[in-house]
Amino acid sequence: MVKGNFRTFSLWKAFFFHDYTTDESLTIDVGCGSGQYAPWVRGTYVGIDLLKRNFPHVIADAHKLPIRDSCCQLLTVFDVIEHLHDDDLFLKEAFRMLEDGGKMVISTPNYWSIDARKDRSHLRVYSYNILCKKLTINEFKVSDVSIYGISRVFSEIPRSFLGKIGKNRENLLSEPVSTLESIYAVIGRSLERLILSSRSLASFLGLHRMSPTLVLVCEKHEGEKCMEP
């Protein structure tokens, strides 16, 4: 059993480490932070980070990683690529490290989300289409998308709009604006559960494009021409 308190987003990311690993696999976590996901990994876990204070297994710049070719089965890159000066150079490094058939799980804030704009260390923002194209250009094949935070689509409705409703709520609702926000959140969480239970439905509705956090699973297939999604 894993110790520690995970917030929802952290727990959601942790599931990727468990679901995409086996007892024989090597997982490389780029931008590992404190390595909090290591207990969720089956097999061998190697954490890479640029910051010494995080005590990673390997201290290195993501643009030039001291890892041999074709050595890992899973590469995780959670909320890292938007901080890099040269995302293409990093993706070439990622492709080099993965074995043929290996997977990379990559996440980044969607371009319209608050998270994408408020962090001044972000050097660029990505939409779903831009990230897919970037991965395809660098020879990855996008094999799956995941949804996180659809409930936040509702909770991030502009405050000005909610304020207008709030001023007239005696004609609409007998409850304060905070209750209205709660209703949006409940609807969003229900949608999330529905989406997570049916990936085909999510794809059909295009809701992966609406998610505040873009999450793509892509694969390395040497010698295979990747088509744009």
Image (spheres, rainbow, N blue to C red):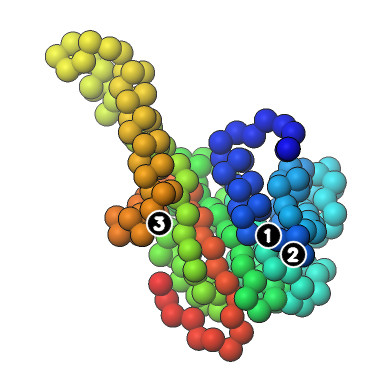
Residue under the image location 46 percent in, 59 percent down? 145
Residue under the image location 38 percent in, 48 percent down? 195
Circle 3 is placed at which residue position?
199
- Tag 1: Cα neighbours inside 10 Å, few (<14), some, or many (≥20)? many
* SS for callout 2: loop
Q: Which amino acid type corresponds to the residue marked 2 in the rendered image?
A: Ser
Q: Which amino acid type corresponds to the residue marked 1 in the rendered image?
A: Thr
- Tag 3: Cα neighbours inside 10 Å, few (<14), some, or many (≥20)? some
**Residues at marks 1 and 2, CA–CA distance in whole angstroms:** 6 Å
Residue 92, image x and y in percent?
Answer: 65, 74
Residue under the image location 36 percent in, 24 percent down? 182
In the rendered image of this protein, does residue 30 appear above or below residue 7?
below
In terms of depth relative to the viewer, which is nearer, 162 or 190?
190
Residue 164, image x and y in percent?
Answer: 23, 22
Circle 1 is placed at which residue position?
21
Residue under the image location 66 percent in, 52 percent down? 18
Query: Pointer 1 and pointer 2: residues touching (CB < 8 Å)?
Result: yes
In terms of depth relative to the viewer, which is nearer, 1 or 187?
1
**Residues at marks 1 and 3, CA–CA distance in whole angstroms:** 20 Å
In terms of depth relative to the viewer, which is nearer, 7 or 62?
7
**Residues at marks 3 and 2, CA–CA distance in whole angstroms:** 26 Å
Residue 33 visible? The answer is no
Residue 24, image x and y in percent?
Answer: 77, 65
Q: Which amino acid type corresponds to the residue marked 3 in the rendered image?
A: Arg
- In this picture, residue 161 sits left or right of residue 69: left
Q: Earlier in the sequence, mark 1 or mark 3?
A: 1
**Displayed quadrant of residue 161:** top left
Query: Pointer 3 and pointer 2: residues touching (CB < 8 Å)?
Result: no
Residue 70 visible? The answer is yes
Quarter the C terminus occupies: bottom left
Circle 2 is placed at which residue position?
25
